[in-house]
Image (cartoon, rainbow, N blue to C red):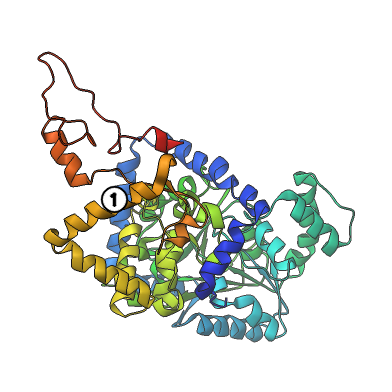
Amino acid sequence: MQVQSMHFKPRSGQKLADVRLQNNLRKLSTKFVAGRAQAITELDDFEATRDDAVARRNLALADLDVWIERFEKAATARGTTVLFAETPAEASRLVVEIAKKHGVRKVTKSKSMVSEEMALNKALEAAGIQPVETDLGEYILQINDSEPPSHIIAPVVHKDKEEVSELFAKVHGKPKLTDITELTHEAREVLRPHFLSSDMGVSGGNFVIAETGSVALFTNEGNEGMCTILPKVHVAVTGIEKVLPTLDDLAAIARLLPRSATGQSISNYFSILTGTRGEGDSDGPEHSYVVLVDGGRSGLIGGEFQDMLRCIRCGACMNHCPVYQKIGGHAYGWVYPGPMGSVLTPSYVGIDKALDLPQASTLCGECHVVCPMKIPLPDLLRKLREKQFDRHLRPMTERLGLAAWAFAAKRPALYRPMVKVASRVLRWMGGDRHRLRSLPLAGGWTGTRDMPAPATATFKEQWQQRARGQSPGAPASSTAPAPQGETRPVASDVSPDADQRRD
């Protein structure tokens, strides 16, 4: 998938102005956010379960090379060929070579974000091999001019039923349907012949298990089974960080993944695929391959961004992110959107190609709170911002502004009078409404909304007034103590006009 992250700002503006998209993105809160909140209450001790899962992932990452070798040995013993790719392009080349080796003409694919990194469909098409996406969301995107997914677990969350209905009628050449059940039945009728005529199936791998040489898959549609057991060849592509030592580790994380992703206690389909079809087996592939992709992952090991390798691709961070909830996934410009993408994209493709993504966050911390792997996403985003600043990758005006602020902030004797003057000037500019309609150097904020005017007194002044028993913001002369036995009211906001400013 071509990197377009450098266009984040203009794309974000377009998405914010898209009324239909804004309506569609409300599904995140009504379905995924509410669903997760309910699902985690089913666990006796969610935090203990999460701590256990984090410890298991850290254990695997601490000796990743060892567990990869054990996986390769166990998988090979069960008839699976394990291949390694340093880059996504190399991974695509390997999959194409496998297809050519077995005379493959058609490939049915189950949803895989790693295959999006690899731009696998384009590579297969260039080799004269037909790829068919069989996940309903991915199929919708493929027939819509190979549109990229906007979410890692719900690829078409940005579309509504009417858009899908119109697309099906156009592509399938059938009467327009509006009922969801009828639409899914129509897609099933179109896809079933592809399942039966496919020569090779390609899937992702949520995890690979070193103990047994298995690939574990969580899905909700059942298409994965049709892609992995019907064709004579099955290829699983996944990142090197997805190795778990044992099936016990998989069981521990399986309690968190569906709940964090879709708000389900368990996925509709859960498969553990081990080796090739054995003697007496009624189904399964005759040839099994696993392609483990590096693609920048090994560069995070042992560094300050290693925590990101714990990610289990549940999508909880983007479901709860106020930025993603307003712009969707396409604005981020690469495979992984939301907070996790704002860290992974600069880490995998280069920070110089994703300058705005570390800034695409309010740093509210919600992504860290809901992450089942407790990845400190706000901290990692701040570290990326620091790296951009140190490498002079941010605009000159921004760097000069921060340098000027830092110079003053390190000198209290200079900073305090400056803040005192600025707060009073801004308060005066706010007028009776206590709102700033425009503000120099802050047009990105005031261009679309007003900025609350600050309090008349600075924080330090208000702190001193509280210490003297005054109401914050009261005139300096009002120092008389309250009559004995009388309690002074406590201000609900640092501003004396807080109630007026909440409209």
Left or right of 417 in this view: 372: right
Camera sees residue 102:
yes
Q: Residue at x 45, y 74 (%)?
A: 354
In this view of the protein, which residue sits in the foreground, 152 or 250?
A: 152
Q: Residue at x 62, y 60 (%)?
A: 224
Which residue ends up furthest to the top in the rendered image? 485
Left or right of 147 in this view: 56: left
Q: Residue at x 57, y 71 (%)?
A: 116
In this view of the protein, which residue sits in the foreground, 272 or 392?
A: 392
Name the element at disc 1. Answer: helix
Q: Is residue 402 above or below residue 328?
A: below
Which residue is denoted by mark 1 in the rendering?
423
Which image quarter is the N terminus in?
Answer: bottom right
Q: Residue at x 27, y 61 (%)?
A: 59
Q: Is residue 138 above or below residue 398?
A: above
Q: Position of residue 472 (x, y in %)?
A: 22, 35
Q: Amino acid at mark 1?
A: Ser
Q: Quadrant of residue 471?
A: top left
Left or right of 96 in this view: 385: left
Q: Is residue 150 above or below residue 65?
A: above
